[in-house]
């Protein structure tokens, strides 16, 4: 029985007869972006590279790019050109503003490279094979460091797709003379050896997975500039001072203590210091304690010794004048 074409299907196949285009037709009309923002490497470095290959990748696409370390697999984050046709595209001004607000000169942002092509199945197979050898190489490098009596601990050995370089991430409490080690490794691996000393927080960025909150470690997921966190932040936020409870996978104070530090400082500055003599709607009294987030002060009244919680907006000086607050030193 012959299959007869139906007029309605023939009209749907004709773009001039339809009110909208198919996804394939829309994709065909999208211009290839000229600049791509990608992420690569164990340290989750971010770069903006030109792309003249004519590819039109989507966010999360695997790309082969020429970076400052060699040819390697990268992951596309976004485009920074206005003609990309993607709703997630950002302008270069927005990108630079984000970098400035995320640490400025300390932000690990690179521009010396270019996108070569979309990663093929052959590229991913080669990359997978190189990754499978990384743990074996780490053991080899650690054994070599031990035989040379170098005071260092090998965190990771990171190759690149093209094999041009191998980066050795290590930790050490002192200065290490690894010139002999680099010569041996360069001969053994047939590549340029880059020694990269990392601290405890960067080590967590490489090897850690989940934190106690159930989320990926911030340093591994999105945090680019790892600044020190002081015990003062824990004290201001009235968090427990037990090191085991406020330390992250790196053994240092958790980075999330910094997120609300500025807000806590501002709210704390509005509250009267402990033992201050203040006025309340119920009469004068002495401040016993304060709750920063709810902006309440516990005041012991002079009249009858009762402890009452008073909002900071209702507190005054004893003479009734507006309260002049100082940073809570309690």
Image (spheres, rainbow, N blue to C red):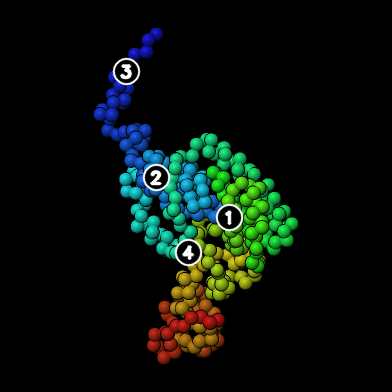
Q: Disc 3 or 2, which lies upstream in sequence?
A: 3
Which dot marks residue 14? none
Question: Helix, strand, or loop for circle 3?
Answer: loop
18 left or right, relative to 213: left
Residue at 63%, 55% in the rendered image? 182
Question: Helix, strand, or loop for circle 1?
Answer: strand
Q: Which residue is mark 3?
A: 6
Residue at 58%, 64% in the rendered image? 254
Find residue 110 and report its image quarter. bottom left
> Residue farthest to the bottom?
319
Pair 1/3: label in front: 1
Q: Position of residue 201 (x, y in %)?
A: 59, 62
Pair 1/2: label in front: 1
Contact? badges 1 and 4 (CB < 8 Å): no
Q: Which residue is mark 2?
A: 51
Number of other residues with Cα within 10 Å of mark 4, as a class: few under 14, some 14 to 19, many 20 or more: few
154 left or right, relative to 272: right
> Residue farthest to the top?
1
In depth, the one of 44 and 299 nearer the eye is 44
In space, the residues marked 3 and 4 are separated at their CA atoms by: 64 Å
Q: Which residue is mark 4?
A: 106
Q: Position of residue 73 (x, y in %)?
A: 51, 45
Q: Which residue is mark 1?
A: 194
Question: Helix, strand, or loop for circle 4?
Answer: helix
Pair 3/2: label in front: 2
Pair 4/2: label in front: 2
Number of other residues with Cα within 10 Å of mark 1, as a class: few under 14, some 14 to 19, many 20 or more: some
In space, the residues marked 1 and 2 are separated at their CA atoms by: 27 Å
Name the quadrant of the N terminus: top left
């Amino acid at each position: 029985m012959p299959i007869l074409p139906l007029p309605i299907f023939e009209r749907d196949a004709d773009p001039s007869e339809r009110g909208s285009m198919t996804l394939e037709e829309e994709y065909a009309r999208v211009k290839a972006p000229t600049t791509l923002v990608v992420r690569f490497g164990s340290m989750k470095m971010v770069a903006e590279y030109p792309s003249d290959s004519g590819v039109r990748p989507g966010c999360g696409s695997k790309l082969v790019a020429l970076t400052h370390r060699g040819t390697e697999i990268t992951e596309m984050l976004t485009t920074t050109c206005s003609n990309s046709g993607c709703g997630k595209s950002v302008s270069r001004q927005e990108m630079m503003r984000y970098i400035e607000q995320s640490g400025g000169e300390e932000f690990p942002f690179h521009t010396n490279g270019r996108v070569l092509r979309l990663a093929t199945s052959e590229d991913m197979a080669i990359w997978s094979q190189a990754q499978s050898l990384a743990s074996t190489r780490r053991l080899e490098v650690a054994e070599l460091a031990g035989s040379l009596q170098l005071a260092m601990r090998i965190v990771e050995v990171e190759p690149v797709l093209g094999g041009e370089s191998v980066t050795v991430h290590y930790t050490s409490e002192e200065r290490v003379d690894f010139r002999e080690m680099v010569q041996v490794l360069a001969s053994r691996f047939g590549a340029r050896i880059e020694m990269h000393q990392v601290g405890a927080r960067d080590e967590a960025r490489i090897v850690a997975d989940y934190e106690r909150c159930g989320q990926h470690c911030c340093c591994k997921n999105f945090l680019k500039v790892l600044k020190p966190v002081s015990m003062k932040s824990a004290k201001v936020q009235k968090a427990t001072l037990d090191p085991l409870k406020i330390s992250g996978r790196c053994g240092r104070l958790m980075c999330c203590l910094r997120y609300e530090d500025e807000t806590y400082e501002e709210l704390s500055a509005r509250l009267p210091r402990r033992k201050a003599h203040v006025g309340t709607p119920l009469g004068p009294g002495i401040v016993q304690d304060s709750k920063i987030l709810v902006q309440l002060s516990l005041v012991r009244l002079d009249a009858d010794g009762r402890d009452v919680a008073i909002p900071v907006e209702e507190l005054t000086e004893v003479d009734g004048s507006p309260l002049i607050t100082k940073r809570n030193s309690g």
